[in-house]
C-alpha cells in the first residue's frame, strides 16, 4: 500500500509515474469567490468544488527544483525555475483535482514542453524567488504574448509550527488534491494523476505589493487570503488522459 493512500481521497495509480519534481518555498494563497463568478470560466464538463458554500481561487508561488523524467537525472536547463500558478478546484469520477487558469514559469523550454505534453496553459515570465532568513521575496512579470499581462510581487514567511491539515478542514480541501484537470484543443477534459506525501504546512503571513494574476479571467479578489506555507514537497506525476467531452 502506498503510504499516502490513507490520507488521499482515493488510491494512487499503480502504473509507473513519468516525472518527479520538487516544490520549494511554496505559498498557498486562497480567496473565497462566488460560485457563479468561476463557473463560466471553468469547462462546463468539470464540476466545480465548493467549501462553506463558496468556490475558491488560489495563487501559488514557489520554486521548482530537480524536475526529471523517471529513471533519468535532472537536466540543469530544465530542472530549476520559479513557477506561479492560478487555480481552482473540481471533481470528476469522485477524484478531487486542480484546474489551472495559468502557470507562469521562468523557463521557456519547460513552458513549451508542458504545453505540448500536459496541455497546460503555461506562460513565459521573468521571475525571481529568493529566501532571505525566513522571508521569501517573490516577483513575476509575464512576458508571453499568448496570455494577458500579469504581475505579482510579494514577501511571505511561515508563522507557526508545521502541521498536516486534517480531513474535513479547509486546509485539506485546498491542498489534498491528487490530480489536475485541463482541456485539449478540442475542449475535452483531461486528467493527470499526481502523488506525494501529505502536505507539511505552516500558517503564514504575506505582504502583497502587486497582484494582477486573476485579471486574465475577470475575477476581482476581495479581503485577506487564507495562507499556508510549505518549505518543500516532492511529487510524482503521470501523463494526462481524456476524462470527459467538452
Image: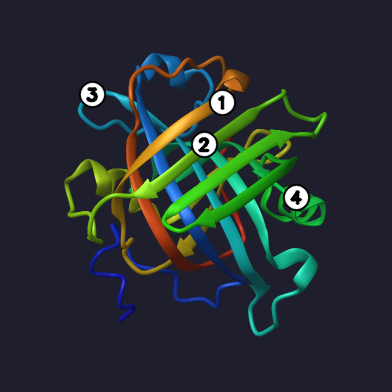
Is residue 22 in view? yes
Q: Which mark is residue 183?
A: none
| Image color mode | rainbow
Q: Nearer the viewer, residue 122 or 9?
A: 122
| Disc 3 + disc 2, Cβ < 8 Å | no
Q: In percent of the image, x 70 and y 82: which residue is there?
A: 73
Q: Which residue is mark 3?
A: 53
Which mark lies nearer to you, 4 or 2?
Answer: 2
Q: What residue is shown with label 4?
A: 111
User: Along the polypeptide, which appears first: circle 1 or circle 2?
Assistant: 2
Task: Tell me if 124 is positioned left or right of 208 in this view.
Answer: right
Crowd rating for badge 4 (residues with CA inside 10 Å; few <14, some 14–19, many 20+) = many
Q: How far is disc 3 from disc 2 in space, using C-alphas?
A: 29 Å
* Disc 4/disc 1 C-alpha distance (Å): 23 Å
Q: How far across and down, in percent of the image, does residue 22 sit?
A: 54, 67
* Number of the label disc, if any, that sits on residue 210: 1
Q: CA distance from mark 1 to mark 2?
A: 7 Å
Amino acid at each position: 500500500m502506498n503510504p499516502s493512500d490513507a490520507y488521499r481521497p482515493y488510491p494512487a495509480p499503480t502504473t509507473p509515474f513519468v516525472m518527479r519534481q520538487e516544490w520549494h518555498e511554496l505559498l498557498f494563497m486562497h480567496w473565497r469567490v462566488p460560485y457563479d463568478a468561476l463557473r463560466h470560466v471553468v469547462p462546463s464538463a468539470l464540476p466545480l468544488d465548493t467549501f462553506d458554500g463558496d468556490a475558491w481561487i488560489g495563487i501559488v508561488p514557489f520554486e521548482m527544483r530537480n524536475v526529471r523524467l523517471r529513471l533519468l537525472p535532472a537536466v540543469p536547463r530544465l530542472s530549476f525555475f520559479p513557477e506561479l500558478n492560478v487555480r481552482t478546484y473540481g471533481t470528476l469520477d469522485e477524484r478531487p483535482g486542480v484546474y489551472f487558469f495559468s502557470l507562469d514559469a521562468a523557463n521557456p523550454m519547460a513552458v513549451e514542453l508542458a504545453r505540448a505534453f500536459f496541455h497546460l496553459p503555461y506562460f513565459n515570465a521573468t521571475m525571481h524567488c529568493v529566501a532571505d532568513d525566513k522571508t521569501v521575496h517573490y516577483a513575476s512579470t509575464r512576458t508571453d504574448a499568448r496570455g494577458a499581462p500579469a504581475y505579482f510581487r510579494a514577501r511571505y514567511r511561515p508563522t507557526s509550527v508545521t502541521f498536516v491539515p486534517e480531513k474535513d478542514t479547509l486546509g485539506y480541501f485546498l491542498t489534498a488534491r491528487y490530480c489536475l484537470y485541463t482541456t485539449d484543443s478540442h475542449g475535452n477534459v483531461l486528467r493527470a494523476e499526481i502523488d506525494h506525501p501529505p502536505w507539511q504546512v505552516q500558517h503564514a503571513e504575506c505582504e502583497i505589493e502587486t497582484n494582477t494574476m486573476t485579471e486574465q479571467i475577470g475575477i476581482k479578489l476581495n479581503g485577506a487570503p487564507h495562507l499556508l506555507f510549505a518549505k518543500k514537497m516532492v511529487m510524482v506525476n503521470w501523463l494526462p488522459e481524456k476524462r470527459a467531452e467538452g
